[in-house]
Amino acid sequence: MSPSVPCCCVCRIVGLLQQYITLTLYRQQAITPGIEAATQLLGLLETASSEQALLEPADFYNDAVNEPDFNIKEDYKRWSSVRGAAAAAPYWGRQFGSAV
């Protein structure tokens, strides 16, 4: 028999992650590495929750992402260009002999 986590603990963790995501989105108006990590953790918690029927799927929705002020398409473009540049940096450094 596997150990279980009380539903109230999972609910509290989900609430804290949602609050972090919401506040960070409102302050930064961008997807930060912290938001990425919090979103990944929410995904893991949602999977565990659905297997154990702990929380409703709606508990994992975040209204801040759906706000008209938050332009997710533009932020995704900005985020992917930064990630692309960061991923390419070691390659370009080796390619042209500079230490990046």
Image (spheres, helix red, strand yellow):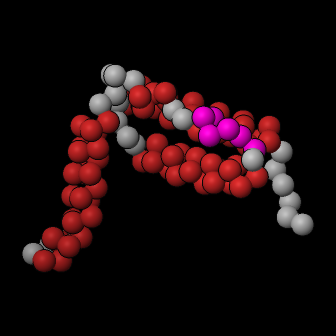
- List the single residue furthest toward the left: 96
Question: What residue is rendered at 80% in x and 42% in y?
Answer: 7
Q: Is residue 69 above or below residue 16?
A: above
Q: Is residue 52 magenta?
A: no
Quadrant containing the C terminus is: bottom left
User: Could you say which is closer to the camera, residue 82 or residue 51?
Assistant: 51
Q: Is residue 17 visible?
A: no
Residue appearing at x 21%, y 66% in the figure = 88
| x and y, in percent, of residue 93 in the image | 17, 71
Residue at 81% x, 50% y is 5
Please tell me in which quadrant of the rendered image residue 78 appears.
Answer: top left
Q: How many marks?
A: 0
Q: Is residue 71 left or right of residue 18?
A: left
Q: Looking at the picture, tell me which residue is in the foreground, 55 or 32.
A: 55
The residue drawn where x is 90% and y is 66% is 1
Q: Which residues are magenta?
A: 54-59
Q: Is residue 70 left or right of residue 44?
A: left
Q: Is residue 6 left or right of residue 63?
A: right
Is 4 located above or below residue 89 in the figure?
A: above
